[in-house]
Image (cartoon, rainbow, N blue to C red):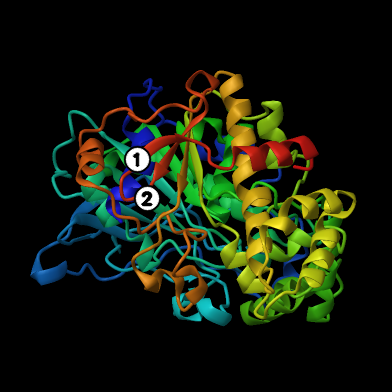
């Protein structure tokens, strides 16, 4: 697994220009510049606080636990951050600091408010074990992968540091930093998921790896009104990510990291998050380069209208008025989660059928997020000076098509679904795809349409737009079947396909392994028309190639519907 991650993260190992020392960043001023509606720790929230007395004032002082010894009785490393001392553990691959708070708990009256800077603590914070994941509920085939413990108090990050870092002696050359944003449709996932164990990447690439948790579902993305002082205004999960990236800028030096060499990377919803940070100007100074794995470019972000409609449907499930923020804040976390799940079963806008794949998530608020990601990339409204590596698996759509349709789909049924999604373009799309599939079950056809339309082709078009603008872009396609079937948690139809997210556990050959360890620039070609648009095919013997589905992507590009 580490070798594959290593190759995707090559950009983190390149030399980037040094930036000014960020130790003197004023957190309050900086966070206000990120988002004008931001609240700081002791600021009034413009509500009748007395009416919230049953909620209680959230406890913002993180509990200082007894300092414990690391594994095998060995003491763990202790570092001093801006907020206080932290004690981690040392294992066979890395030093690890689990569950480090990067913001105060978003609980009580602060449930639907922007993240506030973490309160300083006295004593030594015990970072020897992962904290609870953000609130979520799992059902179906992913239940076994669901975090065992969840909580609203979840704004933590994990830090993995190579074993040769001496915390008592600063490094002459600080290490590059990789910040991982997990996927999960913005309703599930965790930074502490075993599949994302950062110790292997850290040890193998000799980098500092940071993984972060952020608010999910209704907790992170509910929109109940337009006034941020008296309603839930959404996009809190994205603001959480920004707060974590700011924490990295201010504190990572004590872990041996170089804050001027931050690569942000993510998969699926995590890749969507990374694409948004490439668009959001207030995120510009927080990282230097990006890796986008399996980005669902064509799944649309909600408009404000649709986000508000979802909020009204959510409130209806709670027996609260959507305008009664006091009632909404008084709900238990379990009640919020139950209402979220009931609302998720509905399609908010029947004319935007693809929303079934992402009911909750970021929306275009006109302030933080101003347009669709694919539109921003095509128009050049992103941080084009940053190197970007992006790619997809060969059969991204399999997990979606077979996850939504658990029974065979006839040719007639598939025609209905394609028409519902693509409307006036349906006939041309059916004419293109129907002749290629002769079996009675057309789920494979639907899966390929999802792969091409949602993932592969808009990624290719965005990469070409970036290359045309002079950006440094690399593209890959992954078409090797994952060898570890546990990755799919019972989704047997992915055993024979390079499905969505299959990049993560891929093992690479020794040449690529050594290549990563030496921290050189990518030897595979930049995406450019001067090299016939070469893509890196990540297989058991990786090689550069011209895109095998270029003719299909030309078809989608000419339709002009993403």
Q: Is residue 146 above or below residue 125?
A: below
Say which residue appears at 61% left-offset and 61% top-offset.
Answer: 186
- Residue 126 lies left or right of residue 325; in this view the side is left
Say which residue appears at 18% left-offset and 55% top-offset.
Answer: 77
In-front residue for pair 8/184: 8
In-front residue for pair 294/163: 294
- Measured as percent of width and height from the top left, residue 129 is found at 31, 68
Q: Quadrant of the C terminus?
A: top right
The kind of secondary structure element at disc 1 is: strand
The kind of secondary structure element at disc 2 is: strand
- Measured as percent of width and height from the top left, residue 245 is found at 47, 43
In-front residue for pair 128/80: 128
Q: In terms of sequence position, does the residue under pointer 1 or pointer 2 come before the other?
A: 1
Say which residue appears at 25% left-offset and 71% top-offset.
Answer: 66
Q: Toward which corner of the image does residue 157 lie, by quadrant?
A: bottom left
Q: Tell me, yes or no, whether the two marked residues, 1 and 2, touch with CB atoms within 8 Å.
A: yes
Query: 10 Å neighbourhood of mark 2: few (<14), some, or many (≥20)?
Result: many
């Amino acid at each position: 697994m580490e070798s594959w991650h290593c190759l995707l993260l090559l950009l983190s190992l390149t030399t980037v220009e040094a930036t000014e020392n960020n130790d003197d960043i004023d957190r309050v001023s900086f966070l206000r510049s990120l988002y004008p509606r931001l609240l700081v720790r002791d600021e009034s929230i413009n509500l009748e606080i007395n009416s919230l007395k049953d909620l209680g004032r959230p406890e913002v002082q993180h509990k200082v636990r007894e300092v414990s010894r690391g594994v095998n009785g060995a003491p763990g490393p202790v570092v001093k951050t801006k907020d206080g001392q932290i004690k981690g553990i040392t294992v066979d691959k890395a030093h690890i600091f689990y569950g480090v708070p990067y913001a105060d708990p978003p609980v009580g009256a602060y449930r639907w408010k922007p993240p506030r800077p973490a309160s300083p603590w006295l004593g030594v914070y015990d970072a020897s074990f992962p904290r609870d994941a953000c609130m979520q509920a799992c059902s179906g085939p992913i239940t076994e992968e669901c975090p065992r413990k969840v909580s609203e108090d979840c704004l933590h990050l994990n830090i993995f540091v190579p074993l040769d870092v001496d915390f008592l002696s600063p490094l002459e050359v600080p290490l590059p930093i990789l910040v991982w944003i997990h996927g999960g449709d913005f309703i599930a996932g965790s930074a502490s998921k075993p599949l994302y164990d950062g110790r292997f990447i850290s040890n193998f690439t000799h980098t500092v790896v940071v993984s972060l948790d952020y608010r999910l579902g209704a907790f992170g993305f509910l929109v109940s009104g337009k006034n941020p002082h008296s309603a839930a205004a959404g996009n809190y999960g994205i603001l959480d990510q920004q707060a974590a990236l700011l924490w990295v800028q201010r504190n990572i030096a004590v872990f041996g990291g170089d804050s001027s060499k931050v690569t942000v990377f993510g998969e699926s919803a995590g890749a969507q998050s990374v694409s948004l940070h490439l668009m959001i100007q207030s995120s510009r100074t927080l990282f230097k380069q990006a890796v986008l794995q399996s980005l669902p470019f064509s799944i649309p972000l909600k408009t404000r209208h649709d986000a508000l409609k979802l909020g009204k449907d959510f409130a209806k499930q709670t027996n609260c008025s959507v305008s009664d923020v006091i009632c909404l804040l008084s709900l238990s976390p379990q009640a919020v989660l139950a209402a979220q799940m009931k609302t998720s079963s509905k399609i908010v806008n029947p004319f935007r059928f693809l929303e079934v794949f992402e009911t909750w998530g970021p929306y275009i608020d006109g302030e933080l997020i101003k347009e669709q990601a694919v539109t921003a990339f095509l128009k050049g409204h992103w941080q084009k000076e940053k190197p970007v590596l992006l790619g997809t698996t060969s059969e991204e759509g399999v997990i979606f098509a077979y996850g939504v349709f658990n029974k065979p789909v006839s040719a007639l049924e598939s025609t209905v679904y394609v028409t519902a999604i693509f409307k006036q373009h349906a006939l041309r799309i059916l004419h293109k795809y129907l002749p290629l599939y002769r079996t009675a079950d057309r789920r494979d056809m639907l899966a390929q349409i999802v792969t091409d339309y949602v993932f592969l082709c808009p990624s290719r078009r965005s990469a070409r737009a970036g290359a045309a603008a002079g950006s440094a872009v690399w593209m890959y396609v992954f078409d090797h079947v994952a060898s570890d079937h546990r990755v799919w948690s019972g989704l047997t139809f992915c055993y024979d396909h390079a499905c969505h997210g299959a990049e993560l556990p891929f093992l690479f050959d020794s040449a690529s392994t050594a290549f990563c360890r030496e921290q050189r620039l990518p030897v595979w070609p930049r995406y450019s028309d001067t090299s016939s648009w070469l893509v890196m095919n990540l297989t058991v013997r990786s090689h550069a190639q011209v895109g095998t589905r270029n003719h299909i992507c030309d078809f989608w590009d000419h339709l002009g519907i993403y």
